[in-house]
Image (tube, rainbow, N blue to C red):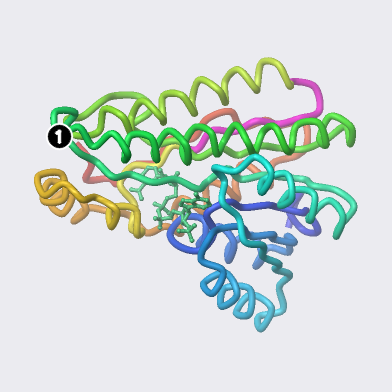
């Protein structure tokens, strides 16, 4: 069990999909997982199941759009365990629509959760990791961080931003802090449930037929974390085999 057992791993957006799968996988391998999301009832159920299997799991209510709440989330883990080894900035939303539909509030929500949420995770975690002299960020982007598709302009823009921020962080943080970008292709989760535009919803329904399980992405997150300290996995892209 190299390099995962005993690590304190914070996961944002752990109440479903990839974050939930990562919590189970990492706890199974001996990490102390600290989960954050808004649906606390879900987190409570996941934490109970992890503990019933002998794992270590805690949770806090978290809205990543609030810098204060993110500070409190990271502060809670640091206070409880005396350190933070990994922050998985995973929380995200994807209400797809054509630009001409002018769903400006949905654009704002994607910017707030997908970009500001990641920045808040960095703002809360970086000073602590610099002080500790170790740490790792695992930021979840998307294949939408590499190319744009119709109805996904704003979503892809947020993921291009996550990719740029992650690369900048890697270059600047250097030294003892590891920085990893994980970019999933279409994956089974609740992500598409927030699509209010009928055209985008239908297109996504077709696309989701080839979705891979969230556990596949959890395995990539685990891979990046379990490497020896001197090994920094910078970027992982995981697609369904059937992906175009
Ligand atoms: P889910 O919708 O299943 O999970 C999203 C998670 O984000 C939920 O736990 C949700 O929790 C949380 N979340 C949303 N808004 C907030 C907020 N304001 N504050 C805190 N948590 C929030 O989708 P996925 O598991 O698929 O998504 C995880 C990440 O993977 C996202 O960044 C997504 O963009 C990315 N991704 C997913 C792909 C896919 O095909 N599924 C493909 C590429 C990337 P709650 O509502 O309880 O707050």
114 or 103, which lies in front?
103
In the figure, 58 relative to 241: above or below? below
Residue at point 44%, 45% (across, down): 92
Query: What predominant SS class does the magenta segment belong to?
Result: strand
70 or 51, which lies in front?
70
Q: What residue is shown with label 1?
A: 101
- For the C terminus, give its image quadrant: top left
- For the N terminus, give its image quadrant: bottom right
Query: Would you say 223 lies left or right of 212 here?
Result: right
In the figure, 109 relative to 9: above or below? above
In the rendered structure, which segment of residues is drawn in magenta? 174-182
Residue at point 21%, 45% (across, down): 242
Residue 185 on the magenta segment: no
Residue 46 picture location, percent across and down: 57, 73
The image quadrant that residue 190 belongs to is bottom left
Residue 160 picture location, percent across and down: 41, 24
Query: Would you say 4 lies left or right of 155 here?
Result: right
Residue at point 46%, 38% (across, down): 114
30 or 208, which lies in front?
208
């Amino acid at each position: 069990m190299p390099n995962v057992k005993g690590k304190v791993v914070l996961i944002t957006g752990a109440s479903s999909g990839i974050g939930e799968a990562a919590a189970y996988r990492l706890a199974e391998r001996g990490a102390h997982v600290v989960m954050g999301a808004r649906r606390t009832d879900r987190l409570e159920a996941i934490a109970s199941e992890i503990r019933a299997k002998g794992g270590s799991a805690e949770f806090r209510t978290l809205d990543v759009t609030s810098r204060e709440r993110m500070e409190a989330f990271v502060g809670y883990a640091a206070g409880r365990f005396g350190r933070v080894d990994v922050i998985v900035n995973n929380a995200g939303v994807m209400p797809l629509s054509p630009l001409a539909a002018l769903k400006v509030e949905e654009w704002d929500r994607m910017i707030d959760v997908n970009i500001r949420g990641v920045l808040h995770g960095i703002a809360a975690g970086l000073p602590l990791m610099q002080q500790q002299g170790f740490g790792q960020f695992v930021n979840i982007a998307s294949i939408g961080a590499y190319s744009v598709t119709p109805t996904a302009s704003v979503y892809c823009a947020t993921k291009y931003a996550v990719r740029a921020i992650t690369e900048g962080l890697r270059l600047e943080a250097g030294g003892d802090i590891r920085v990893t970008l994980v970019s999933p292709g279409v994956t089974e989760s609740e992500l598409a449930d927030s699509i209010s535009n009928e055209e985008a919803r239908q297109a996504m329904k077709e696309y989701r037929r080839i979705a891979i399980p969230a556990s596949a992405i959890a395995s990539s997150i685990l891979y990046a974390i379990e490497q020896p300290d001197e090994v920094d996995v910078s970027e992982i892209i995981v697609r369904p085999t059937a992906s175009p």
